[in-house]
Amino acid sequence: MTKIRQQPVRYIDRTKAQYEALEYGSYNWAHNPEPPPMATLSRPLSELRLGLVATGGIYAEGQTAFTFKDDLTYRAIASDTPAAHLRATHFAYDLTDARRDINVVFPIDALRAMAADGEIGELAPNLFTCMGGIYSQRRVNEELAPALVERCRADAIDAVLLVPV
């Protein structure tokens, strides 16, 4: 069988071009001069409660869709919500694939399978989503991120999978 070689997606270049085409103008990318602090797991993943925070604008049927610019809200989605009941809205990426299979931006089925197989101890009762591409970095740092951390702590989540878009 012939192996197909795929070129890597030039995500940053593609995203910059997409933002430039928006009516909002260019996006001021955050630059952190220091590497992010990383934590070592205190127990094996198979013993942890895993949470999810995704920035793809995912919401469940019956929830309000995200607005397009600087929406600092988040949605809590019950981890037993069927993938077919999830929707995506976002201004900065092509939603075609996400609307075909939500798992490309919100891997809920894979996480449930990992929990069922014992690869993770359990999936948190709520998974969280927000809108990526928020222009106010200060407000993300001061409002959205602390709210998500608080919710993760309230749900006794041991580790979080971050899925950026």
Image (tube, rainbow, N blue to C red):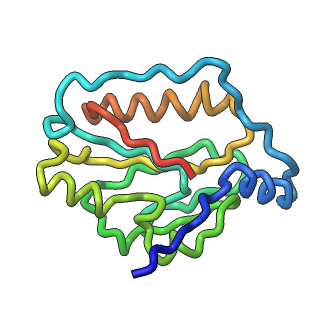
> In this rendering, would 112 be left or right of 27?
left
- Quadrant occupied by the N terminus: bottom left
The residue shown at (73%, 57%) is: 14
The picture places residue 105, in percent across and down from the top left corner, at 48, 59
Q: Is residue 14 left or right of residue 41?
A: right
Residue in the image at 56% along x and 22% along y: 35
* Residue 15 at x, y percent in the picture: 72, 54
In front of the other: 91 or 19: 19
Q: What residue appears at the point 77 percent right and 59 percent down from the top-left corner?
A: 18
Residue 131 rendering spot, x and y as whole percentages: 59, 50
Q: In the picture shown, does residue 143 fall above or below 54? A: above
Q: Quadrant of residue 112?
A: bottom left
Rendered residue at 40%/65% (across/down): 103
Can you give x and y, in whole percent of width and height, for residue 85 in the image? 38, 71
How many dots with numbers? Answer: 0
Give residue 143's quadrant in the image: top right
Front residue of this view, candidates 148 and 22? 22
Task: Using the image as rendered, state which of residue 43 and residue 52 is in the foreground.
Answer: 43
**Which residue reaches farthest bottom?**
1
**Whether residue 134 is situated above or below residue 44 in the rendered picture:** below
119 vs 163, left or right, is left
